[in-house]
Amino acid sequence: MTQTWEDETSAGQRFGFGANWREFLARLDQGRIRQAEDSVAALLGARDLGGLRLLDIGSGSGLFSLAARRLGAAVVSFDFDPDSVACTAGLRQAHFPGDAAWTALRGSVLDSTFLDGLGLFDVVYSWGVLHHTGQLWAALDNAAQRVAPGGRLAIALYNHQPFFTPLHTALKRLYCRSPKPGRLAIALAYALGAGAALAVADLLRGRNPLARHQASGLPRGMRFWHDVVDWVGGYPFETSTPQQVFDFCRARGFELRLLRTVGGKSGCNEFIFLRQAAPDLRQDQGRDSGPCASS
């Protein structure tokens, strides 16, 4: 019998992102919304997204769907986590009630039939999501297929670290399988360690270490604590190198337009690809095979 989202989260096989996003939205303010707008505008190189269709895969809190809609895009948001769907739908109701140009759905990026029913989009946006599906390369393949010719694929994927990736995977698995007090202890320990390291780095650079905990301190309108919980709990967890992602997308007819890497550090590499034409299927190594190249 196929397991549901509820079965997987109860068994510690999947992190409940939506519960964390509910707490994040309880303190959402206009400053963070504007910061999210700035992030989307900078990423896509325009503040006027009027006339564009944007697909937000794994919408989470719904904040970036909201930002794209406020910038004028027609938005389709979906997530596998029902709590995340409720978060996105709640933001839509609060800011764009009854708006036909913003749809919030529940679905999986691994469900080709569901995706085919959505059509093609000028922008397919999936930030820090595809590596949490348990089938990264199938998810990336499906996301790429939703980009219209001439459209853009905007993604962020966890960087592969030969030494740390297995440790991070074990930490996330432990978090998801622990009872609530254990999860809190893991998150607090990580927050204290990461917070101390960041504070020292800020002081060495002559910066105020408290500034990053203000509304304008973290990128994309995020909050430090919710970022910590999202990080330590984010399971399933897969990583990739920039070269692997580049090769995979190039074989499907995409041209790299922007790349921001974290070097050899932990974090997400950010990509924007432009779809030039229909992919050359002769170069496709298969949905489940993943790329062969690495760096």
Image (tube, rainbow, N blue to C red):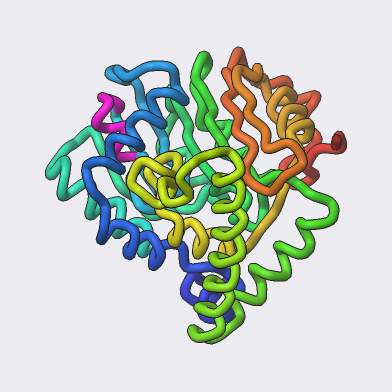
Q: Where 46 sits versus 162, above or below?
A: above
Q: What residue is at 28 percent from the left and 35 percent from the top?
A: 34
Boundaries of the magenta span: 65-73
Q: Is residue 123 left or right of 236 when viewed as pictured?
A: left
Residue at x-position 76% and y-position 47%: 160
**Secondary structure mostly seen in the magenta stretch:** helix
Image position of 218 (left or right of 192):
left
Pick out the residue farthest to the left. 97
Give the percent coordinates (x, y) of residue 197: 62, 56
Reply above or below: 89 against 242: below
Q: Residue at x 51, y 71 (%)?
A: 4
Give the quarter of the figure containing the N terminus.
bottom right
Against 136, is 261 above or below? Answer: above
Magenta stretch: residue 70 in it?
yes
Q: Nearer the viewer, residue 144 or 198?
A: 198
> 255 or 61, which is in the foreground?
61
Q: Quadrant of the C terminus?
A: top right
Residue 114, horizontal then vertical, whole percent: 46, 46
At horizontal 58% and vertical 72% (from top left) the residue drawn is 189
Q: Is residue 153 above or below residue 241?
A: above
Can I make out residue 40 in this image?
yes
Q: Give the quarter of the image for residue 163.
A: bottom right
Question: Is residue 292 toward the left or the right of residue 51 in the image?
Answer: right
Question: Residue 273 magenta-drawn?
Answer: no
Residue 166 on image: x %, y %: 79, 62
**Could you say where residue 60 lies in the image, as x and y percent from the top left?**
41, 52
